[in-house]
Amino acid sequence: MRIRRSVPADVDDISTLHVRAFGCDEGPVIANLVRDLFDDPGALPLYSFVAADETEITGHILFSRVWIDGPGENYRAQILAPLAVAPKHQGTGVGSRLIGFGLDELKKAGTELVFVLGHPGYYPRAGFVPALPLGLAAPHRIPVEHADAWMVQFLRGGLAGEVKGCVRCCEALDDPRHWTE
């Protein structure tokens, strides 16, 4: 398996992957979100990476730009949304490798913090911590029982406690249905 930046020719395979990974109900919604993010100028800079073997794309991760309203408004920030791994490759480390690769690339590009709304048992293994206790609110209300699913990772030291505010995302991601866990 190798990880590389996605190219326009990958879009159909990426969409198919998200449908397979998320199932018949949620998969098409996520696939449409990915296509919308690719087309949204407000998502730029956008970072899209795929894991692939000799025959197929086995995983995909996408990071898009976010802004912080408040004292942290001048920081370079991204959000990880979504991450998908083909069902037969889940549990094999593909997702972890995509996250690690993506975070390394973001750090090289000067990104200072990365957000995710995801499983609180999975993303902390990659260095994410709950964002709400640090004063970083999500673009939409997160129910109290899922507050620990809204997470951040600081790619530059010294930012925890310094950056505070409400995160805003691009139009494609600014839909309340994408903010339920």
Image (cartoon, rainbow, N blue to C red):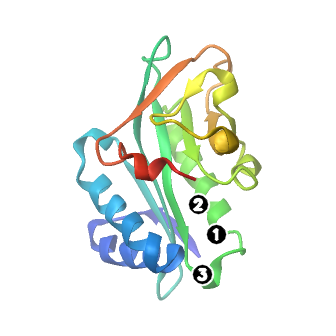
Whole-percent x, y for residue 124 in the image: 74, 46
Between 37 and 104, the residue placed more toward the observer is 37
Q: Secondary structure at mark 3?
A: helix
The reply to whether the C-beta atoms of the residues labelled 3 and 2 are less than 8 Å apart is: no
Q: How many marks?
A: 3
- Return the x and y of residue 5 as percentages of the image width and height: 42, 60
**Mark 1 → mark 2, Cα distance in angstroms:** 6 Å
Element type where label 2 sits in the image: helix
- Residue at 62 percent across and 13 percent down: it is 162
Q: Residue at x 64, y 69 (%)?
A: 94
The residue pinned by badge 3 equals 87
Residue drawn at 50 percent across, 78 percent down: 23
- Horizontally, is 3 left or right of 25 in the view? right
Q: Residues within 10 Å of mark 3 (few under 14, many from 20)?
A: some
- The residue pinned by badge 1 equals 94
Foreground mark, 3 or 1?
A: 3
Mark 3 vs mark 1: which is more N-terminal?
3
The residue that mark 2 highlights is 98
